[in-house]
Amino acid sequence: MSLKLKVYDVKGSASGDVSVPDGFLNVKNGRQAVQDAVTVHLARRRAGTASTLSKSHVAGSNKKPWRQKGTGRARAGYRQSPVWRGGAVAFGPHPRSYDRKLNKKVMRLAFRRAFADKLNAGEVMLVDNIELGSAKTKEFSGVLNALKAKKPVLVLLGKPDKAVDLASRNMKGVEIALARDAGVFEILKCAQVVITSEGWEIVKGRLSTDSKSKKSDDRKESK
């Protein structure tokens, strides 16, 4: 028996329901794909700007500090030695890219598995539409309170909405994203997913295993 999700309006009243196909819920594979997707996402967030000086970059001449024998001190060949204060750093980090790639099919499977877990846990809510009269935080906060959305909450829109973006940008625990761009990491870290009706149609295309739907799947994460 397929799952039915209630559709709410901005006042929190149920206005209907939507049936979720069993194929969206019964995703047995994909646990490793989810972990790989999160690993790639976190790796891409790393700046990779850590930098240290190797001995070729430390200022100094090649002159021997003192003669090899007879001083009673340990032999020294150059002042840029890593064992000296002000010298080089041995095996230190240098600027690099932490970018990693993941197969598109694996990324799609990861999204399907992550979203299926949210559906089975009852953490997905559909709202008919979110239309704000003005870009005020108080108004958007009232919508989320009426829906009784748990924070952190991820709100998926079908198309960009400037009023929603402006009203939510200083709200803690609220993240706005387009349904076509939402990634595995964003879905996993939220306690509740709120999707507009238009956004749900896009998400259904990403959850479908039909080959025609795969062409528009995971645009953000496949970059």
Image (spheres, rainbow, N blue to C red):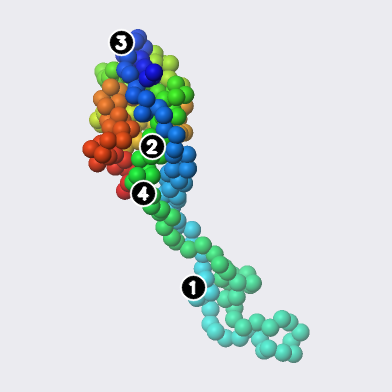
Q: Amino acid type of disc 4?
A: Asn
The percent coordinates of residue 9 (x first, y second) are 31, 14
Mark 1: few/some/many CA within 10 Å (<14, 14-19, 20+): few
Q: Nearer the viewer, residue 153 or 7?
A: 7
Q: Which residue is mark 4?
A: 103
Q: Are marks 3 and 2 in contact (CB under 8 Å)?
A: no
* Location of residue 221 (image quadrant): top left
Mark 3: few/some/many CA within 10 Å (<14, 14-19, 20+): few
Dot 3 or dot 1, earlier in sequence: 3
Label 3, label 2: how far apart the Cα atoms are: 28 Å
Q: Nearer the viewer, mark 4 or mark 1?
A: 4
Instruction: Give the structural element (helix, strand or loop) at label 2.
Output: helix
Relative side of 61 to 144, left or right: right
Dot 3 or dot 2, earlier in sequence: 3
Residue at x-position 35% and y-position 15% = 6
Residue 57 - label: 1
Q: Amino acid type of disc 1?
A: His
Mark 2: few/some/many CA within 10 Å (<14, 14-19, 20+): many
The percent coordinates of residue 121 (x first, y second) are 47, 24
* Location of residue 141 (image quadrant): top left
Q: Amino acid type of disc 3?
A: Ser
* Location of residue 17 (image quadrant): top left
Dot 4 or dot 1, earlier in sequence: 1
Q: Which residue is mark 2?
A: 111
Residue 4 position (above or below residue 32): above
Residue at x-position 33% and y-position 19% = 19
Dot 4 or dot 2, earlier in sequence: 4
The percent coordinates of residue 25 (x first, y second) are 40, 27
Q: Are marks 3 and 4 in contact (CB under 8 Å)?
A: no
